[in-house]
Image (cartoon, rainbow, N blue to C red):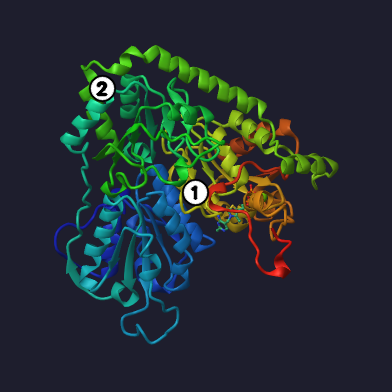
Amino acid sequence: MSEQDNRSVVQGPTKMTPSEAFVETLVANGVTDMFGIMGSAFMDAMDIFAPAGIRLIPVVHEQGAGHMADGYARVSGRHGTLIGQNGPGISNSVTSIAAAFWAHSPVVIVTPETGTGTIGLGGFQECNQLPMFQEFVKYQGHVTHPSRMAEYTGRCFDRAMSEMGPTQLNIPRDYFYGEITCEIPKPSRLDRGPGGSKSLDEAADILAKAKFPVLISGGGVVQAGGVEECKALAERLACPVVNSYLHNDSFPASHPQWCGPLGYQGSKAAMKLMAQADVVIALGSRLGPFGTLPQHGMDYWPKEAKIIQIDADNKMLGLVKKISVGICGDAKDAAAALTERLANRKLDCDATKDARLKTMNEEKDAWEKELDGWTHEKDPYSLDMIEENKKEKPFSGGEYLHPRQVLRELEKAMPPRAMVSTDIGNINSVANSYLRFEEPRSFFAAMSFGNCGYAFPTMIGAKVAAPDRPAISYAGDGAWGMSLMETMTCVRHNIPVTAVVFHNRQWGAEKKNQVDFYNRRFVAGELDNQSFAEIGRAMGAEGITVDKLEDVGPALKKAIDMQMNEGKTTILEIMCTRELGDPFRRDALSKPVRHLDKYKDYV
Ligand SMILES: Cc1ncc(C[n+]2csc(CCOP(=O)(O)OP(=O)(O)O)c2C)c(N)n1
Ligand SMILES: [Mg+2]
């Protein structure tokens, strides 16, 4: 059968089995790759994946499958799809579906469940699979009758796109069998448009009177494919453009108006410019609370400014920050509609353009200089650690390196079109200042769910969707331990990825709280690791240990060369000092209080 044949979908009401209806609907929605671990619950459908042109990529653990589907969706804009065995195969992926939810990824998780003939009797692998996902999916399609298989499958794919997040397709396992007559539904995709003309007019009026507008380019700009429209709006306003937190790929770093990311370990230039804004346009951003917290000792959010927020989800408008105008629309279309409204209009900010761009350039230069000189952390704990680490040698014999210097070297060696994913951890967070991108769909950070173990499997999924692009994941040694087994997925299935592991022998990010609030009383924060390069080699990957600063860039380049030209996965282990950058949540902790005598010293 030719490629053409197996990807053409049966038309009109047709007699088929529910398994066939399910698989045909996957094909209708363009599914070519799925992630998961095989199981008897869906074997009848799985049996015909290959003739339908669908590859099921087996993973090591189902959490990985969810992250891979997420990465696949984030890089391609297409659905990411995963499937697993009822019960444990499904519960294993709860965390990664929660992560995909906060990344707004169109992921479809297919959850075959116990057969209807025995539900409620406490049989093997029986559990109620809807409650465990209800908070993390936009829609739960529970197939209520075999004849409705295609209908529910299609709706899950439609809703994942229209609601911008994961959906769940729950299928009692006996419903794959039988004979039905049904029609495969055509995918329906929402045409969102720019938003209401009243709100767009109001926004244009506010912009016309702005003296110091600042544009926040958010994840919605990436999802809408609206970078060019965002650029045009920014250029019309001649305003600084900042990336919303962890959306560093939402505006090209080489553009003269790019000022870097807001939020934790972001750009001081971006935040100082935000502080001066009298009008803020948040384009495609929910203005999430964590991404707008005070940083670098600066409460930069401009409380007096007028805020224009544009989001495709109306529920996000004004949810976190007080706004003047909310536009419910597609970021690309809304930016174009605003630019059109401003095109032939005299703007107050035209007169202040030169001064504004001068201020912007001064702030950008100052931040770059500060970053160049910021070779290591300077707080008392970090200085103590740096001294202590100088006295010891890593197992590889060289020296422990300063994370910031390592991150700068990685930045300099980054290949064009690189896709980078980052995990949750101290060094990964500091990386925010050093990750700059030219094209959208390049940066996949663990978003608001904030789970360690996110970055590597997500990058594996991204690489499946974009095999022509260099794929690089960052993780701390703790987070790496949660995900490293997926190295076997890379090796077994020829999905080459370069995994950078910051080996600092600790759960650093959390330890930082013990430094700041618990008088350096360290509980469960130390990690005594073997060499991750060696563990990687044992799994069939390449392994490189770096313990000299001058080797960082060349090692990354070598690993990328092996990835792109030899199809090899490399674990690039970088030996780092135990110094620690600013913590995640100073706002959420307080100094300990003890009332009981036996704990009185623990303050
Ligand atoms: C699944 C999960 N468990 C625990 C945490 C809490 N947590 C946040 S950061 C962190 C430490 C990460 O350590 P590591 O990966 O070694 O990076 P480092 O901070 O040392 O750079 C922990 C335990 C989390 N975010 N996710
Ligand atoms: Mg660590």
Is residue 363 found left or right of 215 in the rendered image? right
Give left or right: position of 417 versus 280: right
Between 339 and 469, the one nearer to me in the picture: 339
Give the image location of residue 92, x and y in percent: 49, 66
- Counting from the top left corner in percent of width and height, residue 575 is at 72, 43
Q: Is mark 1 within 8 Å of ligand 1?
A: no
Whether residue 329 can be seen here:
no
- Residue 582 as seen in the image, left or right of residue 257: right
Q: Amino acid at mark 1?
A: Ala
- The image quadrant that residue 598 belongs to is bottom right
Residue annotated with mark 1: 446
Q: Amino acid at mark 2?
A: Ala
Q: Where in the figure is residue 234, as x and y percent of width and height?
A: 34, 24
> Label 2 vs label 1: CA separation?
37 Å
Quadrant of the drawing holding the N terminus: bottom left
Category of crowding for the residue at label 1, using alpha-carbon neighbours closer than 10 angstroms: few (below 14), some (14–19), many (at least 20): many
Q: Where does the C terminus fall, quadrant-wise?
A: bottom right
Q: Secondary structure at mark 2?
A: helix
Pick the residue in front: 224 or 513: 513
* Picture residue at 72% right of the left edge, 30% below the top: 550
- Res. 340 image quadrant: top left
On residue 502, which mark appears?
A: none
Could you say whether the residue bearing mark 1 is in a helix, strand or loop? loop
At a point 57% along the width and 21% down the height, the residue shown is 366
Q: Which residue is mark 2?
A: 208
- Residue 581: x percent and y percent? 64, 41
Residue 367, quarter of the rendered image: top right
